[in-house]
Image (cartoon, rainbow, N blue to C red):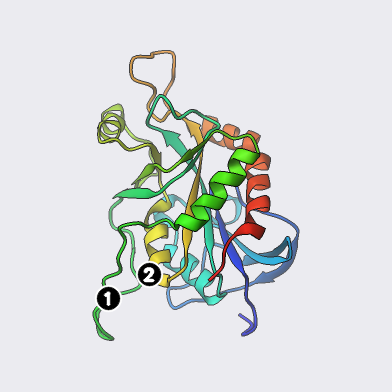
Amino acid sequence: MSGDARADVGVIGGSGFSTFLDVVEEVEVQTRWGSPSAPVTICDVGGRRVAFLPRHGPNHCLAPHQINYRANIDAMRRLRVGALLSPFAAGSLRGDIHPGDLVVVDQFVDQTRGRADTFHDDFAEGVVHVPLADPYDVDLRSVLVKVGRAHGFAVHDGGTVVVIGGPRFATRAESGWYRSAGWHVINMTQYPEAALAAEAGVPFAGLALVTDYDSGVEGDQSVAPVTQEAVFAFFEQNIERLRAVLVDALPLIPLQ
């Protein structure tokens, strides 16, 4: 990577979100933890340099448990981004959160196993325990809520995403357990992405586009459990609206 390559804001795209805008520059970034999911593309949005990275790689070739999250976040850190936005597809766990809604999450619960989830594999250079009571940046969240509502989305200000390992979807019993705990949406990639961003010192916000009702809606047999085909189709139908929210939000993002 060129020593002067840098960006103002980073965006990590999820399922169905593999490109962003017209590319000004493409950057190959190597990190201590290997290569990120794809080369980073730099776009101009409202005069800001925006680094975009598809977390699942080109053509969605990486399953959630195969993503090199450490390399992805470190690549953004090496580009010196002052904030990082993470749009992602999610299933609803609640009857009042509907497909097509946005949830600007403020908490996560980790239900994954075995993922490399820290930059601090040892304490040879000193003890490091990163505070993570509030993993999502309040100022970034505020911008996303405001802009999402201005675009006509039903936006939920806050919510807990439970992160499962995948690539399978949840069983009815698992989904019911998560719902009974009071959690709001379900996803496969927000952990360890959010935790690593905190370790990297980069303000982070997760923006869920709700695509389905996960295993269905309790008491309503007419709502079918989620399928891969339904998720991808729904995301494709709404990707331009989501892209428009990000484009309008990026110039308003407060930077460190």
Indicate which disc residue 199 carries.
2
User: On screen, 249 above or below 26?
Assistant: above
Q: Secondary structure at mark 2?
A: helix
Indicate which disc residue 9 carries.
none
Q: Whole-percent x and y of residue 2?
A: 64, 82
User: On screen, 182 above or below 200?
Assistant: above
Residue type at numbered disc 1? Val
Residue type at numbered disc 2? Glu
**Apparent side of residue 234 relative to residue 186 in the rendered image (left or right):** right
Q: Residues within 10 Å of mark 2 (few under 14, many from 20)?
A: some
**Can residue 15 be seen at all in this image of the molecule?**
no
Which residue lies at the image location 33% right of the left edge and 19% below the top edge? 218
The earlier-in-sequence mark between 1 and 2 is: 1
User: On screen, 110 above or below 131?
Assistant: above
Q: Whole-percent x and y of residue 41?
A: 66, 65
Which residue lies at the image location 52% right of the left edge and 56% below the top edge? 140
Q: Whole-percent x and y of residue 139?
A: 50, 57
The answer to which image quadrant residue 58 occupies is bottom right
Mark pair 1, 2: CA separation = 9 Å
Camera-nearest residue between 97 and 221: 97
Which residue lies at the image location 63% right of the left edge and 51% below the top edge? 246
Q: Whole-percent x and y of residue 68?
A: 44, 63
Q: Secondary structure at mark 1?
A: loop
The answer to which image quadrant residue 4 occupies is bottom right
How many discs mark residues in the rendered view? 2
Q: Residues within 10 Å of mark 1 (few under 14, many from 20)?
A: few
The quarter in which the N terminus is drawn is bottom right
Indicate which disc residue 128 carries.
1
Which residue lies at the image location 56% right of the left edge and 68% below the top edge? 255
